[in-house]
Image (cartoon, coloured by chain):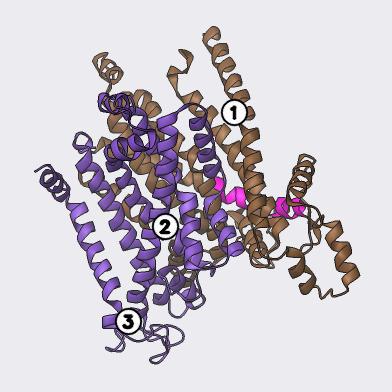
Amino acid sequence: MQRFAFLGRFARNRGALVGAVVILVVAFVAVTAPFFFPRDPLRIVGQPELWPGEDPDFLLGTDSLGRDILAMIVHGARATLLIGLFASAVATLIGVTIGAIAGYFGGWTDEIAMRSAELFQTIPNLIFVLTIVVILGSTLTNIVIAIGIVSWTPIARMTRAEFLSLRDREFVQACRSMGMGNAGIIVGEILPNALPPVIVLSSLVVAGAILFESAVSFLGLGDPNVASWGRLVGDGRQLIRSSWYICAIPGVAIMITVLCLNLIGDGLNDALNPKLRDR
Amino acid sequence: MTGAGSSRRMAALKLLRRRLIQAVPLMLGVVVINFVLIHLAPGSFLELMTAENQVSDPATIALLRKTYGLEDPTWLQLLKYIWALLHFDFGFSYRQNMPVIDAILLNLPATILLMVSSIALALAVGVAAGVVASMKVRTFWDTIVSVAAMFFFAAPSFWLGIMMIVLFAVKLGWLPVGGMATIGGTGGSIAGGAGGILDILHHLILPTLALGLFYAAIYTRVMRSSMLEVAQLDFVRTARAKGLSRNQVTVHHVLRNALLPVVTILGVQMGTVLAGSVVIESVFSWPGVGSLLFDSVSSRNYPVVLGIMVLGSLVVITANIAVDLVYMWLDPRIEIR
């Protein structure tokens, strides 16, 4: 019943509902990309620089080499969404681990954890990502890990705050008096209670990760085998005088996706904290 | 009054001292992390450097290895690097053929100019829009502001920059496509006089908008909810009960307190703004640290990359301390502490 009440509150937020529907459509398109566009999206199919609508075979036109932009956008959705999800997962894993340990144990453990969070906020994040990617190689895995490494700090702070407020509650004390170990209490008792706000933050980190990845790919440092949306914007950059749509279309795709993820995050936030809904 | 003033000044000095002490381990951490990261790189930058300059003589290479201290174990290299940093020696950049610090300082002013103008724009737009939205809450204006903020919060800055180039530079021809000064013009530097400064400002408009509007969107959202929150506090009701008008209360009581969360976020995001300028500099061929970084990263010129990281973090820490002091100046409760 509680779950339905939660869904009801989420659905009442119209923006969040629209966001969720759009993201589901994007995810569906990403999953079914090989079905609608079974051939390599990076192969040349027609005349170069056809404007959208100029040729009914290529709804969104073709780029400077004569590649179908729609096919590249659809396949790019796969790369972009996957990178966003995995990078957020990496950030959540690091952030929850560090935040939980810091909040639960307190003392110097907490001090070290929070100082390192400060450290990672000091280092200019995107510059750090670019350096990691250049040094370790432009592969999908490295990009995902690099984005995760610069995105964990807000999650760690949030998890820490939740653990601080939960660690001395009666149910935790009861577990302790029954002789339960620290690991058991952290993972089995406190974590499930601390997770809801952390999940909201993770959904926002997905949006941030997509923006990060698009910037890395735009600068030409992305995985050369993957046509993510950021790379498509970068590829079209030379032609803005004659064919600016080549740049514009993938950028719109990024913007809509990030916008909808943010809407979902806001909706989850409202649904979890009904008191704050009117702000 | 003087008593309260001097106690505030004491508190500010205390804060400054604490922040400076905390900055030392922070800087050390930055250096160690980046140094270790760069040493994870397969092969040394020396290989690229010698390949680029077509040096193949083994004796020369051995001499270079010795000069750059690559024979030493990593920990000793790290200690030597930190020691050199303490003397403001960031190493030598073979590509620019000058000390790393000179290469960075040559590019730093352009980046700082872009950062400062973007932050100023973000604060001005964000605070104004947030105040309007909160005073006209749940009206047409509130909706317009919130929708605009949502869009600018989601648009990638580099893409926004390109789209603005298409509109304002290519189609309308109002503003330059990129660069910092008109090529062949009299300007291009402060030496160009008033005309030169105007020329730079003319080139600054689009990059500032591209970088600043994203942050303006964030500040708008924070400012709006913060204004609404502060407006419900007791002291605001007291001020209204004293007979002050709604506008007076908003300006003198609510605004100042509502600014605090915006200032906090500004401090946290300093590193992000610096990093964001890297991308924007690439879009607009802005001759700042970002362009230098991009060139150095692509050519694996690691001493420069490391130097930019260290100096960039130093800029961030300094800006953070400044933000802390501003926060203290704004927060009326600080005297009680």
Q: What mark, if any, has residue B19 been given in the picture?
A: 1
Other-residue count near label 2 (Cα within 10 Å), few / some / many at <14 / 14–19 / ≥20: many
Q: What mark, if any, has residue B332 been given in the picture?
A: none
Q: The residue under label 2 is which amino acid type? A: Ala
Magenta part of the protein: which range? B100-117
Whether marks 1 and 2 lie on the same chain: no
Q: To which chain does the residue with label 3 belong? A: A
The residue indicated by pointer 2 is A87
- CA distance separating discs 3 and 2: 33 Å
Residue nearest the observer in this picture, A45 or B250: A45
Q: Main secondary structure of the magenta part?
A: helix
Q: Which chain is brown?
A: B
Residue B158 horizontal/vertical position (percent): 47, 62
Q: Which residue is at 64% across, 28% downward?
A: B21
Q: Outermost residue, right direction? A: B59
Camera-nearest label, 3 or 2: 2
Which picture quadrant has residue A272?
top left
Residue A74 horizontal/vertical position (percent): 32, 75
| Cβ atoms at labels 1 and 3 below 8 Å apart | no
Residue B287 showing in the rendered view: no
Q: Is residue B116 magenta?
A: yes
Residue nearest the observer in this picture, A170 or A27: A170
Residue nearest the observer in this picture, B12 or A53: B12
Residue B86 showing in the rendered view: yes
Secondary structure beneath disc 2? helix
Chain A is which colour? purple
| Cβ atoms at labels 3 and 2 below 8 Å apart | no
B233 over A242 or under it: above or below: above
